[in-house]
């Protein structure tokens, strides 16, 4: 028997599936929760922990007692819902999946793969389709951040099929999100956004507020890259409200970081106050990342890089260099190739400003290699544009114009609107 449990804003919804292999309609029960649980949002089946938290259930189907734990809390202390659904093998599978998540997020990729694959093997052997899907989508995330796009796509599609067979909407949304990110990596931004819009609709149907907040934040990311600044702000603010209402510090910190990035990029001589707001958002994010248990080193690295970009924009070059060195060390430690590539690009931009052209060329080349490995076509296009525009800084306008025209031709092959094209914008200024 399958149990689907949804906890969302003061209300606990249970769907009992008598036979998980059929399409028999579930028996549904709704309970209202005490005020202290109003911030919790959770969707699970049987004995499954979601990526943000795990929860203890001890129940006779009428009384519900909950105690939240951090993601890294070992699952061997959790009490099952009943003898019918709780057994050692199920607990062990979920423990492996959580260990895989932690290893992936801390840059221990070989260990993460080992944990996910072991979880899949045991879950398939025990005929636990939901745990199989959770481990499969985790393996997809791992392949994606390593730049193994074909393997990632294969895992996401497997998980998508498994989740759909179970009618598990939140899981289906997570698999679609992964496919959206893969499309983003190869420059298909409109296709990527379509995946995210579908995922957002599924989270709304599932009444999963944290999932909905995640998708609003991701939509903001895509709109940011597409140059739709107002719409990006709108979705970031909506995501921030949902995260804060749910008392989710991780999500809140992530959105503060994105808002800071957007305000930093928008700031100019007419709106210098945006830089002040950006710095405040970075500091808010950093404090939240530090208070997590364990601290979110990836988030801290992103904030440190953002502060470096901010200092560079304000002309505080020495501070910028220090921030870049610190952030690059963090990205290397957690094996975040995309973050390292972005950081190298920012560092090279600073070196161009300082006249350190040889160092800039080296760092652009390193960033380009990383983007190639990841298959990030937009990242590659941006770095190539930077390399090719270097004659502009030496005063050769004729060469620069020719370079921008070549870059514009290359960018036309990507899914980028004119307002998001750096080459198009720079040609207008010559």
Image: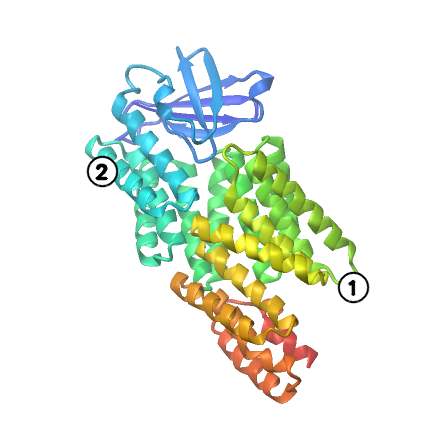
Against 356, residue 145 (above or below) is above
Residue 149, horizontal then vertical, whole percent: 35, 57
Q: Residues within 10 Å of mark 1 (few under 14, many from 20)?
A: few
- Name the one closer to the observer, 221 or 260: 260
- Name the one closer to the observer, 364 or 188: 364
- Name the one closer to the observer, 349 or 254: 349
- Name the one closer to the observer, 272 or 298: 298
Name the element at disc 2: helix
Residue 271, horizontal then vertical, whole percent: 78, 58
Question: Looking at the image, how many numbered discs can be counted on the residues?
Answer: 2
Residue marked by disc 2: 121
Residue marked by disc 1: 269
Residue that lies at the very extreme toward the left in this rendered image: 125
Q: Quadrant of the N terminus?
A: top left
Q: Quadrant of the C terminus?
A: bottom right
Residue 60, horizontal then vertical, whole percent: 39, 10
Say which residue appears at 51% left-offset and 79% top-offset: 409
Say which residue appears at 37% left-offset and 17% top-offset: 79
Colouring chosen for the image of the structure: rainbow
Name the element at disc 1: loop
Disc assigned to residue 347: none
Q: Mark 1 near mark 2, Cβ–Cβ under 8 Å? A: no
Against 401, residue 154 (above or below) is above
Q: Is residue 354 visible?
A: yes
Q: Is residue 228 visible?
A: no
Q: In the image, is 403 to the left or to the right of 99?
A: right
How far apart are the two marked residues, 1 and 2, measured between alpha carbons? 58 Å
Say which residue appears at 44% left-offset and 36% top-offset: 51
Against 319, residue 38 (above or below) is above
Residue 259, horizontal then vertical, whole percent: 65, 49
Mark 1 or mark 2, earlier in chain? 2
């Amino acid at each position: 028997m399958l149990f689907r449990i949804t906890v969302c804003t003061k209300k606990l919804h249970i769907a009992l599936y008598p036979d998980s292999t059929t399409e028999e309609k579930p028996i549904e029960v709704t309970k209202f929760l005490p005020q202290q649980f109003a911030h919790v949002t959770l969707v699970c089946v049987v004995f499954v922990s979601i990526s943000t938290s795990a929860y203890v259930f001890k129940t006779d189907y009428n009384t519900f007692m909950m105690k939240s734990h951090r993601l890294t809390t070992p699952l061997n202390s959790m009490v099952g819902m009943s003898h019918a659904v709780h057994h050692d093998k199920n607990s062990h599978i979920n423990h492996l999946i959580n260990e895989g998540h932690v290893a992936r997020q801390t840059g221990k990729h070989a260990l993460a793969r080992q944990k996910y694959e072991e979880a899949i093997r045991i879950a398939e052997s025990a005929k636990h389709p939901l745990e199989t899907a959770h481990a499969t989508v985790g393996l997809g995330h791992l392949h994606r951040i390593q730049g193994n796009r074909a393997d990632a796509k294969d895992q996401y599609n497997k998980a998508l099929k498994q989740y759909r067979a179970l009618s598990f909407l939140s899981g289906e949304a997570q698999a679609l999100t992964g496919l959206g990110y893969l499309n983003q990596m190869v420059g298909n931004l409109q296709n990527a956004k379509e995946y995210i819009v579908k995922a957002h609709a599924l989270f709304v149907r599932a009444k999963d507020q944290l999932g909905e907040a995640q998708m609003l934040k991701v939509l903001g990311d895509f709109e940011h890259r597409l140059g739709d600044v107002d719409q990006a702000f709108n979705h970031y603010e909506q995501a921030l409200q949902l995260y804060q209402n749910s008392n989710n510090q991780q999500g809140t910190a992530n959105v503060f970081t994105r808002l800071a990035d957007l305000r930093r990029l928008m700031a100019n001589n007419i709106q210098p106050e945006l830089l002040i707001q950006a710095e405040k958002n970075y500091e808010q994010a950093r404090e939240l990342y530090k208070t997590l248990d364990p601290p979110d080193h990836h988030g801290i690295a992103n904030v440190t890089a953002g502060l470096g970009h901010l200092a560079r924009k304000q002309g505080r070059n020495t501070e910028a260099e220090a921030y870049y060195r610190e952030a690059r060390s963090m990205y290397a430690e957690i094996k975040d190739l995309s973050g390292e590539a972005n950081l190298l690009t920012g560092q090279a931009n600073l070196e161009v400003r300082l006249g350190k052209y040889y160092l800039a060329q080296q760092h652009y080349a390193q960033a380009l290699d990383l983007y190639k490995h990841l298959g990030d076509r937009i990242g590659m296009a941006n770095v190539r544009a930077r390399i090719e525009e270097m004659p502009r800084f030496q005063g050769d306008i004729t060469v620069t114009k020719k370079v921008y025209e070549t870059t514009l031709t290359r960018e036309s092959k990507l899914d980028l609107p004119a307002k998001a094209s750096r080459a198009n914008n720079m040609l207008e200024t010559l």
